[in-house]
Image: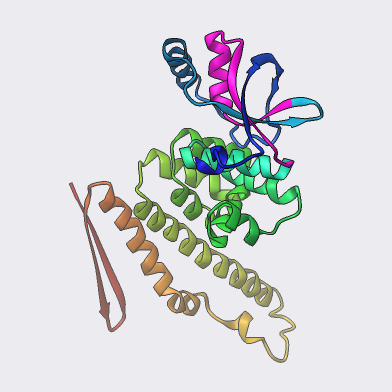
Amino acid sequence: MSIFFNPAKSDRQLRKLPVEKIQPNPMQPRRHFDSDAIRSLAESIKRYGMIQPVSVRVQDGKYELVAGERRLRAARMAGLTEIPCIIIKAAEKTSAEMAMVENLLRCDLDIFEEAEAIERLLAAGGCTQSSLAESLCMSQSAVANKLRLLRFNAEQREIIRSRGLSERHARALLRVPPEKRTEAIIAVSEGGMSVTCAEEYIDGLVCTGLVKKQLEKQIPAKKSVQKNTENPPEEIPATQSKPIRTLLIGDLTLFYNSIERSLSMLRCAGYETDFIKDEKENGVELRITLKK
């Protein structure tokens, strides 16, 4: 926390300020506050006082909170009229960065609050993903990965947040087509899947979808050729004449992988399964055993 409260800094002073004169930070990255945790902190403040000051900056003649939103809320709940504050000199962008870093150090932000805060900092201008990553002590790829999480809609974010799925779960779920994403999120959470099981389940969905798309490309072409049998074209394009069976044989690897992923998900859930593939002269025999 020395980046906030370094006593060597000459542009910072410690003072007691009236609680009602401290305005919230409009760039506060944290959007969800645990009321029980704040009540517990308020009880601690009543008993021991406010041990750690909040940080504020002077903005348009008023005091604006930089870091310490939970402490400020708890102090108000505890009935304090004045609290210790460190007054710092900070521009709006620096204030937003400091608020975010403090929350990151405390692990107070959920994955979407982090992503939304990063997006707001970038939107404020004056920095790139690379420079912002350096300021936040992250890699550029970590910043980019967090921003990708904003592809989830509001409903999907709430399901992920309320059911306690991790950032790795969420990143894996981004591979699912948007129209199937909500269904997949619910399946992963209700199944209590680990990240590994979730990735294998998602692999199965993606592989199945790829095969389905290839079939959809072939079936309309085949119907089109059948309708024109009275006046057949001189030459039928290869893509239209390709039999469906040939297509599936070419994509059998995807098909096998899809089965393996599904069975792996069952194994993660505690079921014993066997999958035997026996290639014969006239075809391939697949035997799946699910043991009770």
Residue 54 percent across, percent down from the top left: 57, 27
Residue drawn at 60 percent across, 46 percent down: 115
Residue lying at the far left of the rendered structure: 292
Q: Residue at image x 67%, y 48%?
A: 119
Q: Position of residue 24 (x, y in %)?
A: 68, 26
Specify the farthest residue to the top.
79
**In this picture, is 43 found above or below 23?**
above
Question: Taking the image as drawn, is residue 111 in sight?
Answer: no
Magenta stretch containing residue 265, yes or no?
no
Whole-percent x, y for residue 132 in the image: 63, 55
Q: Residue furthest right?
A: 60
- Depth order, front residue of 283/148: 148
Q: 59 or 120: nearer the eye?
A: 59
Q: Is residue 87 magenta?
A: yes
Image coordinates for residue 211, horizontal then vertical, percent: 50, 67
Decide which of 121, 290 is in the foreground and name it. 121
Q: Which residues are magenta?
A: 63-91
Task: Please determine whether, in this image, residue 249 is positioned above or below residue 219.
Answer: below
Q: Please, is residue 86 above or below residue 115 in the view?
A: above
Residue 240 visible? The answer is yes
> In the figure, residue 40 lies in which quadrant?
top left
Query: In the figure, is residue 273 to the left or right of 194?
Result: left
Picture residue at 35% right of the left edge, 53% below the top: 197
Q: Is residue 113 above or below residue 195?
A: above
